[in-house]
Image (cartoon, rainbow, N blue to C red):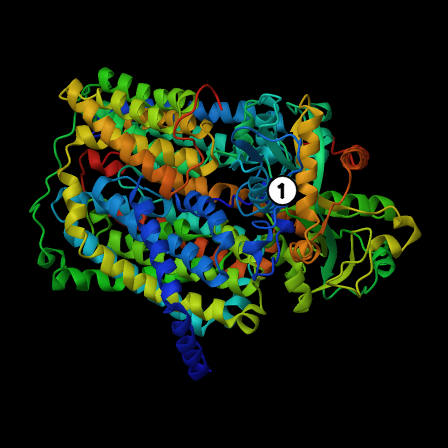
Amino acid sequence: MPLNLTRRAALALPLIAALPRSGFAQAGFAQAGFAQEGEWRPARTVRMIVPQGAGGTTDVMARLLSAHLQQRWGQSVIVDNKAGAGGVIGTQEAIRAAADGYTILMGNVGAQAIAYQLMRSLPYKPDDLTPVAGMIDGPNALIVNSAIAANTVPEFVAYLKKTPNVSFGTPGIGTTPHLAAVWFNKLAGTESVALHYRGSGPAMIDLYAGATQYSFDALVNSIEAIRSGRVKVLGVTGTERYPLLPDVPTIRETMPALSGFVSNSWVGLFLRTGVSAAAIQSLHAGVQSLLNQPDMNARFLALGGVPIRKSQPEFASYVREETAKWTAVISSAGLSGNL
Amino acid sequence: MISTALSDLWFGFGIALLPQNLLWCFIGVLIGNIVGVLPGMGVLAAISILLPLTYSLPPVAAILMLAGIYYGAQYGGAICAILLNLPCHPPHAVTCLDGFPLTQQGKAGTALGITMLASFFGASFGIMEMIFFAPVLVRLAIQFGSTEIFSLMLLGLLAGSTLAKGSPLKGVGMTVLGLLLSVVGTDVTTGVPRFTFGILQLTDGVELVALALGLFGIAEFLKSVNRTLPVATGNATIRLKDMRPSRSELRQAAFPILRGTLVGSLCALIPGTGPTIASFVAYATEKKLAKDPSRFGRGAIEGVAAPEASTHSSVQGDFIPTMSLGIPGDSVMALLLGALLIQGIAPGPQLIKEHPDIFWGLIASFWIGNIMLLVLNVPMIGIWVKLLKIPYRYLYPSALFFICIGVFSTNNDLFQVGETLVIGIIGYGFVALRFEPAPILLGFILGSRLEENFRRSMLISHGDLMIFIDRPISAGFILLSVVLILAQVYFRVLRRKPPLIRVPTDEGAFE
Amino acid sequence: MTDGPSSWAHDLAAGCVLAGVGVGAIVVGQSYGIGTLQRMEPGFFPVALGVILIGIGLGLAVSALKLRARQGHATTPLFDVPDWRGWLFIVGGVLSFLVFSTYGGLLPGAFACVFISAMGDRTTTWSRALVLAGCVAVAGSIFFAYVLKVQMPLFTWGPA
């Protein structure tokens, strides 16, 4: 089979990580917290569209939530994987469905923030979707070939400035690791060449060999390589340090020029615009009751990120900010309409 | 070192033989076997559909089951290829070439018997490789960057281009057509959509399963409907005795099995070369080495034994880079990796130390699973062969349905079903012009890798073509390619030398 | 019929088809930009393949003409007439699967697909096709829906 690990998988895979194996079964599948009296409840089967294949973070999030909602509502919630074209096909399905709250979309940063500026002809616009609730937010790591004489981000920026023809590998065009690198170079005033691979595995091999010099990659994919010393890690792209790597600084704390540099992959729940406020409320409450379960922090951490605990308007404005941020990065890098 | 490996393996058997794990392993190989026999439904689809069900299983059971589907399907796939000439999934496309002629000669039982033997041998070798050489092999595997992969793909293309029977020129033409088809979709290097004609679903490229089943399935039905004579089942009441290949057949198959196994185990290590490429390369190797290459495509037992051994050893070997580096070799492995990650296990150098139960349990279960498959399939051969007695008029409509649902399940998208139909109709046109469809698959599989890795290498070397010679592994493959071309030219000249007045066949193009 | 040997006419047509595809690849491919071998643009590879295809196509056509000069006129019929009934029903079977599985679900889709394509065989009677379609649809749908959990509902009304 050809490497199907294309953009969609690359967008999704970075996040999956360790769910502590004990108790995963009980995690989302029990303690659903029953819905309040008078809350909107579905009267028939709900379909949750995942615009990605099985096994990615977006899919894992959907399975967790669907089991939880099923208990909460006493109504079956079916996960429907509609992968293709970097999430566009699944999103399109969600928008075409009736605006009754019976079709929900487990979206992510790729199709719900980056795609608007990156894709040439996108069959939907931001207004077609209403962000309902965030699920998980996961950072990338800046990793470099171990032979490179730089142990901190400032040293690395200096290295980039004096060395010509430095290149970085990406798991695919338009993925957060790719755009993070583009943005990093822009902020640091450096230049390097992007090499695109099908997924982060092959990119990692060229990084080991020194064919490429550095890469941004989801922690989940790189943490083993970091621990075994095959690559050096210089920083993480989150707002805060990653609890599993407490000694590694965030990139934004390392240099003033990079103080605005935050680049996370996130997954969240969306409905097509026009669904009743009651349904939105009910779904948001359902997500919160999942995220507020006591061991969810640890569980999400193992999955490569942190739960997004935001109110519905907060999440909506987060999505708007993210869209604006990536739109600016993409257009300033001349990547608009690249796909 | 060997003794520790053996005691670890003993520990692994302890894990794999736990009733619960044994059960999941059995379920896995059983589902795999069935999925393998059914045309259409691929391993990738089966695993991605069943993956969510394993989220709630304990990790060892989950991975044993999913892995079981993967190698179990390979056993099933061969059956379909040999008996029905349908490559139920791509690695077995080359098995059709000689397997089906054997069936037509009434030797289906023998072919299946040899296949099972070759499969088991290949798989066992792959497993042993994983036990004893994993650390060494891993060091080799991380040498395969873009440059090396390009050179290897080039060699594979040159070696495989003479794969088809019949006119060499037409075979090369089909290979090039396959290369061209692989271009369809978003260009990985620049993001430009090519030959998609504005169709969103085509941005991910042509689906391999749709291509294989369109060409070998639908095109074949269109060609054969109302026209086939029943396949001679030979002695349709096959007894266990008939399946046992004769001594001379075994002797004939022994070295091809060995060579196929080696080819497969090498291909497994290199990211991006799964069992499909392994089987093509093994077939091409046999054809190159054969004293009388013209036997191939007409029921040569080597043409079944080598690719099957290769597929199976590659399938088992595939787990080496995945488990010990955390780098998946193909999309099936990427899914299994995902399954492990979801369970809280990060594959990588630490895996063997941190989760010996998973690593050794999995290895032990490979053997158990393969034995189960052998036990499951050998007595079944007689029943499988009876498939041939089903009249074609009942067989093709059922197969058509399996193809439709199988292709649908690769992406949960009916678009792919339509794609298969279109490919089938166009494919019929090519078959009618006496083209062989197999080389298209080869070109299709190699094409995108060839192009992407070449372009990446050029970016890495800043436009210096010498990069392919400067790197030792790559240089080796380039050298082999040159030797291959020179040998081809030499033999051609040599063959022309005797001034024989040959009638039409001398053009090669007109066999 | 399609199993007969390859005649010069087949090769001539095959050569023309390959060359035609090659021309198409060049025409569409060059619009993506060609670049150079060292700095390939997305059009380079398809255009190069197009050129090779034209070469192979011409080679085939020329050798076909040479053979024709030697063999004289074709002995086998130039092109096979497809079995139109089989064609109609097989293509119809797949199309009906597309339609019925969208608007009716897996079971109706399976039934329509098997039944319609079975009617493509001239020896199959209505009743036999019905029985076959019924058996395959029921057994197949249950297997795919419950054992393999294919993401398609057994029954549905209207497009999902």
Q: Residue at x 9, y 51 (%)?
A: B238
Q: Quadrant of residue B367?
A: bottom left
Q: Position of residue A162 (x, y in %)?
A: 85, 56
Count of number-bearing discs: 1
Residue C12 seen in the figure: no
Depth check, front residue: B351 or B179:
B351
Q: Residue at x 23, y 38 (%)?
A: B506
Q: Is residue A32 above or below residue B197?
A: below
Q: Position of residue C64 (x, y in %)?
A: 29, 26
Q: Is residue B371 left or right of residue B66?
A: left
Depth check, front residue: C113 or B496:
C113
Quarter occupied by the C terminus of chain B: top left
Residue B443 seen in the figure: yes
Say which residue label 1 marks. Answer: A34
Subunit that carries the residue with mark 1:
A
Q: Position of residue B472 (x, y in %)?
A: 55, 63
Q: Is residue C136 above or below residue B250?
A: above
Q: Quadrant of residue B407?
A: top left
Depth check, front residue: B411 or C11:
B411
Q: Is residue C88 left or right of residue B476?
A: left
10 Å neighbourhood of mark 1: few (<14), some, or many (≥20)? some
Provide the secondary structure element on which disc 1 rests.
loop
Q: Quadrant of residue B230?
A: top left
Q: Residue at x 71, y 38 (%)?
A: A133
Q: Residue at x 43, y 32 (%)?
A: C152
